[in-house]
Image (tube, rainbow, N blue to C red):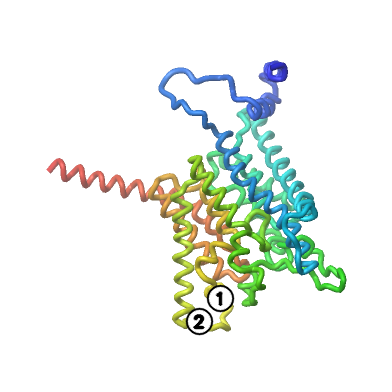
Amino acid sequence: MGLKQNLHNLKEKYRGTKFEQGFNALHTFLYLPNTTTHGGTHVKDATDLKRVMNTVIMAMIPVLIFGMFNAGYQHYLQINGTAEFLTMDNFIIGLKKVVPMLLVSYGVGLGIEFIFATVKKHEVEEGYLVTGMLVPLIMPVDLPLWMLAVAVAFGVVIGKELFGGTGMNILNPALTIRAFLFFNWAAWMSGDKVWVHGAVDGVKKISGTDAISGETVLGALAANKPLPENWDAMNSFLGFIPGSIGETSTLLILVGAAFLILTGIGSARIMLSAVIGAAVMGLIFNGIVDANVITESSKFYSLMNFPFWQHLLVGGIAFGIVFMATDPVSAAQTSTGKIIYGFLIGFFSILIRVFNPAYPEGVMMAILLLNVFAPTIDHYVVQANVKRRMKRLKVKTT
């Protein structure tokens, strides 16, 4: 009670000063606001923006912890040829690589949010709480921190605050940050030297071994290389493969999806329709291969021949569908629009993945593309509903 009273006294002390918005943000993070609305009809609900953001973060915690273990596991697997997963050495490597990314992501992002709130004299918005967690999870493990800081600053200022802040951005902020990194420092965001800790440092002469490879399943397929035995469907589903920190474990991503759907935060329509869209595009490519339209010498053969259901287990498509395509701000808003929006994200994700040999992943570009067209999708869905109702009205009046 004493702490709460002291914080209340400080709140009154800073009222009307330039520090008011920043202190209010810290205060409401610890305690619910003690104000109530007056007049009119209001929905009585315990859910607010902060609670929604915290729920999404909780859904990502298992993926985050798994990613820390996997960072060390992939490193030692490359060096020794064999490794155990749940070891303290693995976790320490993940801790050293992921925690600094989290600190930079939240430090830079929230710092800019506080600055804009102070200058514009509005409350600090909680929208970046989820973005701050998403950003490290979609990055390569050895990404330099200064690059991350620059990208976060760009994403928050240009991708969010320029449009008016939380609730006004047209693009997913986390993917805006990733796109900025990819188009400015592509060598750190793609290729076969960035997905395993230590690979980017060059040759690692440990007991006569060769350099650590940072290649992913999609990278190997894009180069028409045979996949190692340990990159089978089960290991891909469980997550024991190289990749971005949070994208490898489809199992834990599905756990997060179930949690978001049960809590009413994530859209089941978007998730399911995106999976169907990806499966349809994968089936089309499998059919092209089965019809002998292309030969094994084609640079697209391996990705086209990859079983359609396995496309959903590798790369960032599962993570993107669950945690970023469902962003309530940049996604479609109508029920039918969500189905169309999700289907096209899945469809274009596989299409871009196969036909872009320089960057064998497509979910980032697919989501950003559909973010732009989400309002258009909703517009035509609403207009179609209006036309149907007008037709029914004419029938009743005649």
Are the residues at dot 2 and dot 1 in contact (C-beta closer than 8 Å)?
yes
Q: Which residue is under mark 1?
A: 300
Q: Position of residue 332 (x, y in %)?
A: 45, 48
Residue type at tag 1: Phe
- The numbered mark, 2 or 1, whose residue comes first in the sequence reads 2
Q: Position of residue 3 (x, y in %)?
A: 72, 19
Q: Which residue is under mark 2?
A: 294
Identified at 73% across, 40% down, the residue is 107
| Secondary element type, mark 2 | loop
| Secondary element type, mark 1 | loop
Q: Is residue 45 above or below residue 305?
A: above
Q: Position of residue 137 (x, y in %)?
A: 66, 51
Decide which of 259, 225 is in the foreground and name it: 259
Left or right: residue 138 versus residue 88 is left
Identified at 64% across, 77% down, the residue is 226
Mark 1 residue crowding within 10 angstroms, few (<14) / some (14–19) / many (20+) = many
Residue type at tag 2: Ile
On the image, which quarter does residue 192 sit in? bottom right
Q: Is residue 99 above or below residue 213?
A: above
Left or right: residue 280 versus residue 27 is left
